[in-house]
Amino acid sequence: MPRHPLPIETWPDAETARSSRLFSALELPCGLTLPDRTWVPAMVPWRASADGLVTPEVLDWYRRLADGRPGALVVEATGIRELASGPLLRIGHERYLPGLAQLVDAVREASAGHTRLFIQLIDFLAIRRRPSPERFFGRYLALREAHREAAQAAQPGLDRDDDEAVRAVLLRLPPAALERALDARELEALSVGQRERVSDTWLPHIARLPQILPQLFADAAARAQRAGFDGVELHYAHAYTMASFLSRLNTRDDGYGGSGAARARLPLEVFAAVRARVGPRYAVGCRLLGEEVIAGGSNLSDAQHYACAFGQAGFDFLSISRGGKFEDARQPAVGQAAYPYTGASGQAAMPSVFGDEPPFGLNLPLAAGVRRALREAQLATPVVAAGGLNSFTLMEQALADGDTDLCGAARQSLADPDWWEKLRSGRGAEIQRCLYTNYCEALDQRHLQVTCQLWDRLSSDGSAASLSPDGRRRLEAPPDGWRTRSRGS
Ligand SMILES: Cc1cc2nc3c(=O)[nH]c(=O)nc-3n(C[C@H](O)[C@H](O)[C@H](O)COP(=O)(O)O)c2cc1C
Ligand code: SF4
């Protein structure tokens, strides 16, 4: 049962909205002007082709979000490498450009040129699905002396050089004996699936990350620029490579881990490479964590330190998120991969009405803390807040209090893409309000095309929205005005 009811909201009339902080313009340090402070953060809808190309469904998704004319819209996490990654957008090669350019055109047209369009650039490391014990012991486990000893202790007389026999004994070991026989990484590989970390520097491709990532991000940013995007958001948040460099858990000893300065080194080098490629007049921001919400992870003081270093370097905006880590993710079923939004850190990233605290504006104190540190350091870098921002009053107050410069709303924009336009034009009473129950996030977790539970209920409005392959969910928000029309009919 939801623990927290939606707060009752008094919506502004058009005149109040027009003269509000929320609907006032903001110029980024690079010179790009955002028409207002409204922002749709990145959301993966799982609509790209299997090889990462823009599809008609991707165009429909962004066109629909742009209908509401947010000041800024960030396209989903888009992979910068030539790596197979299922229906996630990619930008690691020239062949992605035509589709991405179409996406830019679609957003320009739907928002009548109002919305500034950014694309989130992501790198991630390999993660395996949780194996069955048979597969793990039969194929994946690299046998060590300790394994042979444990097998021999369990079955005296066993030929310890007979790999197949050793593997068969290990497979049958009781949990307590297994815990002694396997090291922590092997136990993790067995129980949740093997996951690479940035501190695995014994792996050559991990050791070389600082040498290859600046170039990869710079190439991707140059492509985004050529496709017509207004800027890029470097993904330095959640469970992915760059956030792992910033994490307190990064113990690399090659100058890119350990101290706060060393952890920020690669993110700054990536930024420098991107900036050198796209020039000073192009918007380059990042998303980073205000806190990791895992044991031993980075906290607000780390984020303040990073924010000041990034502001000094010339980032155009800092979008503050929270949590979303693998370290505390729930154990996946056999055959599934761990999902970084299932533990306490995941709840912090996408706070729901089932959590201990109401989700509404829950992560604002982090954005406020980061912004305060920036301003104390005489840095004007704009900050974007997100997390349960779902009402005019909440956002206007956050802007007035100096907690943030820009107001991000992901799930509310999914629930009703027209909500920004309804706010702007004094039609707040028509807004379909997000319930923060995370039905959408559960679809994301299963890598299914993301939709909103509120759209499902509205499938009989007569619009031509296509349905999911199982025919059970509509793939597009109903058109603006459906409520008024259905009431009238
Ligand atoms: C379906 C879905 C997909 C998301 N994909 C991304 C993503 O690609 N990159 C990212 O930084 N955050 C992603 N997020 C997190 C949102 O950008 C946002 O930070 C989070 O939902 C909290 O904001 P909200 O309360 O306004 O929804 C996603 C969220 C949802 C619900
Ligand atoms: S499914 Fe819809 S109502 Fe539920 S949390 Fe997601 S956007 Fe909000």
Image: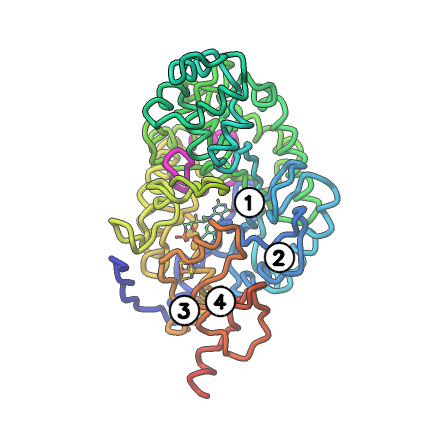
Q: Earlier in the sequence, mark 2 or mark 1?
A: 2
Q: Residues within 10 Å of mark 4 (few under 14, many from 20)?
A: many
Tell me how far mark 3 sits from mark 1, CA to CA: 26 Å
Residue 367 relative to residue 35: left or right? left
Residue positioned most to the front: 157
Rendered location of residue 58, percent (x, y): 62, 57
Magenta stretch, residue numbers: 307-329
Q: Residues within 10 Å of mark 3 (few under 14, many from 20)?
A: some
Check contact, mark 3 vs mark 2: CB within 8 A: no
Q: Nearer the viewer, mark 4 or mark 2?
A: 2
Q: Earlier in the sequence, mark 4 or mark 3?
A: 4
What amino acid type is highlighted by mark number 1? Ala
- Could you tell me which residue is drawn at 29 percent across and 54 percent down? 354
- Say the numbered circle drawn on residue 58: 2
Helix, strand or loop under label 4: loop
- Say the numbered circle drawn on residue 418: 4
Q: Residues within 10 Å of mark 2 (few under 14, many from 20)?
A: many
Residue 206 relative to residue 50: left or right? left
Q: Pointer 3: what residue?
A: 432
Q: Nearer the viewer, mark 3 or mark 2?
A: 2
What amino acid type is highlighted by mark number 2? Val
Rendered location of residue 149, percent (x, y): 42, 12
Rendered location of residue 289, percent (x, y): 41, 37
- Could you tell me which residue is drawn at 48 percent across and 77 percent down? 482
What amino acid type is highlighted by mark number 4? Asp
Location of the N terminus (image quadrant): bottom left
Tell me how far mark 3 sits from mark 2, CA to CA: 22 Å
